[in-house]
Amino acid sequence: KPQPTPIKGFNDVAGRWQGMVDLTTRVVVFIDPNGIMKFQGPNNITQQTTIENEKLVLKSRHTELLCTLINDFLACNARFDNWYAELSLRRP
């Protein structure tokens, strides 16, 4: 099983990421070097993220993301309101 790469700082994940939630719902994420995430997908959100236990975390009322870096993919457990998804985002 691939081991996650620790996220030590926002530069480790800065840039554009994209993927699909399901067959029809696309996700595009942009993370700036200060950790501001612009998330476009089931919910659109722009918010400051944090790094907790070497994972990237975003928590808001309608959206929660817990992301790890695995083999150059940003793998996220996501909650959008009351449904959950696994995201596997890659750099374009």
Image (tube, grey):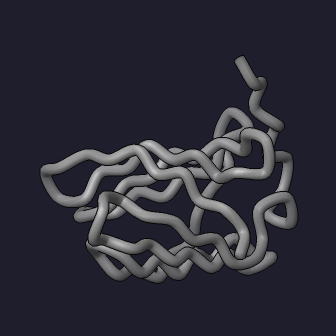
Q: Which residue is drawn at 38% across and 50% down?
A: 78
Q: Count of labels shown?
A: 0
Above or below: residue 23 compared with residue 70: below
Q: Which residue is drawn at 85% across and 58% down?
A: 12
Nearer-the-camera pick, 32 or 88: 88
Nearer-the-camera pick, 87 or 23: 23
Left or right of residue 76, residue 83 in this image: left
Left or right of residue 26, residue 84 in this image: left
Above or below: residue 7 compared with residue 92: above
Left or right of residue 73, residue 9 in this image: right
Q: Which residue lies furthest to the left in this view?
A: 82
- Where residue 30 sits in the image (x, y, percent)? 62, 79
Q: Residue at x 79, y 63 (%)?
A: 10
Q: Residue at x 29, y 51 (%)?
A: 79
- Quadrant where the C terminus sits is bottom right
Left or right of residue 85, residue 46 in this image: right
Quadrant assignment, res 53: top right
Quadrant assignment, res 5: top right
- Where residue 57 sits in the image (x, y, percent)? 55, 51
Above or below: residue 38 compared with residue 25: below
Quadrant assignment, res 13: bottom right
Q: Which residue lies furthest to the front in this view?
A: 23
- Where residue 88 sits in the image (x, y, percent)? 54, 51
- Quadrant where the N terminus sits is top right
Above or below: residue 62 compared with residue 57: below
